[in-house]
Image (cartoon, grey):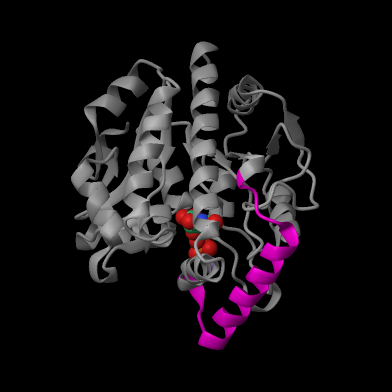
Amino acid sequence: MKDELRNYLDITPEVAEAVEKGRPVVALESTILSHGMPYPQNLEFAKRVEEVIRERGAVPCTMAVINGRMKAGLSEEDLVLLCKNEGGKIGKLSRRDLPIALATGATGATTVTTTMILAHYAGVRFFATGGIGGVHRGAETSFDISADLQELAHTPVCVICAGAKMILDIGLTLEYLETMGVPVVGMGCEQFPSFYCRQSGFGVDYVAEKPSDVARLAQVKWGINLGGGILVGNPVPEEYALDFDYMSGVIDEALAAAKAAGVKGKDTTPFLLAKVVELTGGDSLATNIELALNNARCAAEIAVAYAKEDCQ
Ligand code: PSU
Ligand code: MN
């Protein structure tokens, strides 16, 4: 870590030691906790996801900003604070918000974008999440394109997700990633998954048969100084997948509700996520939790393979 970063970033001793010794570490985001799942299921999930990473032989590293400090690795107290989100005071911090949060001593959850930034600062190469942000439907007039895609273009972190939700335009999201030079990998699948569903109708650039295939790709991409990220789509386990047509209907309804309520900008994604949970009577929450745990397992296996190949 660069010396000047020490003024702003706290890394737990466990994570710092693992990074120093080239051991596997997996980053986790906190927006999925504060703005993606209700309390107390989010707290239970936050602890469980760290456990599944440990079970696979890697060190978990959940990211956030607490009282104006970037944190790589959180205490249980931090997790409770983020999950309770009392009074809705926990911010949702993207790249543009990060310096403001640090300058004002704020507390906030990190999105895919800011989790990648903190992971990069802390020397962590792999990051498991649920779904990424992307090009929103109607972006041709709203210009709503998640900063996650720019971060994937520039920051050398490999993100393991269950694809992108159909609240987004998945075709345009993949076009954007192609323009930005981000390899999109299918973990044992030929189609980029669509979060609740295993398929989307859109193909990936490379089918990885096993976690070490992704580790090898990362070694090569960063080895030839291409920099930037890698996106891995890991489909939700069959038994938790939801019906494609059913979810398409739910998402259309959620989008209509967002339009009627006049929701815009950074509030759009959290609004849609909460609406989908409501409309599915909680079924989508169970799927969300299971797919995120599945991504954490996959990310840990990739990180373990990467560390074994000694290619840091
Ligand atoms: N998509 C999901 N679940 C999430 C998010 C997106 O299916 O929790 C969160 C992630 O933190 C992601 C952020 O980085 O929302 C994207 O927000 P926006 O669309 O405002 O960029
Ligand atoms: Mn947006």
Q: Residue at x 62, y 72 (%)?
A: 143
Give the residue drawn at x 23%, y 61%: 106
Q: Is residue 146 magenta?
A: no
Image spot of residue 212 (x, y percent): 62, 20
User: In the drawing, does residue 137 fall left or right of residue 312?
Assistant: right
Kindly indicate the quadrant of the structure image that contains residue 191.
top right
Residue 89 vs residue 223, the one in the foreground? 89
Query: Where residue 116 appears, x then y in whole percent?
Result: 45, 44
Say above or below: 166 vs 180.
below
| Image-quadrant location for residue 234 | top right
The residue range painted magenta reads 240-266
Chief SS of the magenta region: helix
- Which sits in the foreground, 122 or 223? 122
On screen, residue 61 above or below 282 = above
Q: Which quarter of the rendering shows the N terminus?
A: top left
Number of dots carrying numbers? 0
